[in-house]
Amino acid sequence: MMPANLRSTLSRHVRLPPLHAGRRLKLKRNNFGFLLTGLVTTLITGPLLREFSVLAKDQEFLVWLMESVFSLMVLIGVWSLQENRRVFRLGLLLGMLSLLFPVLAWDSRSVLLGVLEVLVFLLFCVLSCYLAAQHVFRGKEADINRLSGSVCVFLLIGFIWGFLYILLTMLRPGAFQGLDAGESMHVRADELLYFSFATLTTLGYGDITPVTPLARTLSILEVVCGQFYLTILVASLVGNFLAGRMQR
């Protein structure tokens, strides 16, 4: 480590970065790794808890636990917003708000509270998707952070439409056919997220189908958005690869 007196002497003539600048730079370069970790964890935690956990028998506690997992995803993903200070502060505020919902929902299961909760998660996913897409399409090097960001954008598209489907079901019950009407809204939310990713990847199993005009329109828009994203992403990566070869 550089002595303090030598560092102070050199700082008069040479502008030296802070000692922790390297850590910040490394964190910034890998910011989308945090978001990717949170998204993947959220996708796999819910099914694992429902299938193999003894907590699955206690539906109330399981719902509270799942809400806490989503809140944790938001807090982990907030670090992906650090490239923009204003958006980072907004994401941090959304993360703090998301922590309140599991606490408030412990004694209350009102529809209004559920709608506000979904809106907070939806807004966070939109912000994260916007910044990740900017990094993916404006970047010049195919580094690990850019690749992580490209996966995050694809997953976030699925989450965004999933939350839109959940909102639609809350406000318009019966918008989708194939959902178990006897289950709680949180179980149906898992099914709608599954439907969102099945639609995004054009699998189309047919076990859940949209029946209202708005639900069908949202499904069409998700397919179009997903296909255009993959096309533009591949074109961008190929263009950067060819540009790099020409410079050599």
Image (spheres, rainbow, N blue to C red):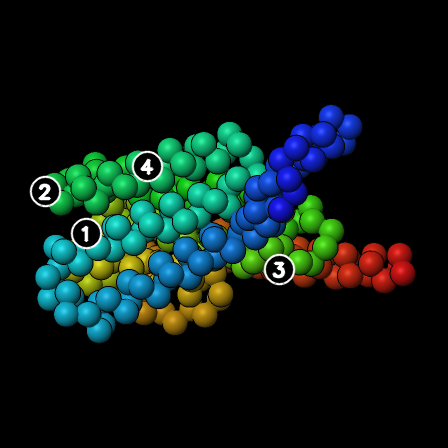
Residue ID at (20%, 63%): 180
Q: Residue 79's mark?
A: none
For the residues marked 3 and 2, what is the alpha-carbon distance in whole angstroms?
43 Å
Residue 13 image point, x, y percent: 78, 28
Q: Disc 1, disc 2: CB below 8 Å?
A: no
From what the image shows, is residue 109 above or below residue 193? above
For the residues marked 1 and 4, what is the alpha-carbon distance in whole angstroms?
16 Å
Mark nearest the camera among 3 and 1 is 3
Q: Amino acid at mark 4?
A: Met
Mark nearest the camera among 1 and 4 is 4
Mark nearest the camera among 3 and 2 is 3
For the residues marked 4 and 3, what is the alpha-carbon distance in whole angstroms?
29 Å
Query: What residue did someone put label 1 on?
Result: 64
Query: What residue did someone put label 2 on?
Result: 107
For the residues marked 1 and 2, what is the alpha-carbon distance in whole angstroms?
10 Å
Residue 194 image point, x, y percent: 35, 63
Mark nearest the camera among 2 and 4 is 4
Residue ID at (13%, 59%): 59
Residue 158 image point, x, y percent: 44, 56
Query: What residue did someone put label 4 on?
Result: 96
Residue ID at (69%, 35%): 6
Q: Disc 3, disc 1: CB below 8 Å?
A: no
Q: Amino acid at mark 2?
A: Asp
Q: Residue 144's mark?
A: 3
Q: Amino acid at mark 1?
A: Trp
For the residues marked 3 and 1, what is the alpha-carbon distance in whole angstroms?
34 Å
Residue 22 image point, x, y percent: 61, 46
For the residues marked 2 and 4, what is the alpha-carbon distance in whole angstroms?
19 Å
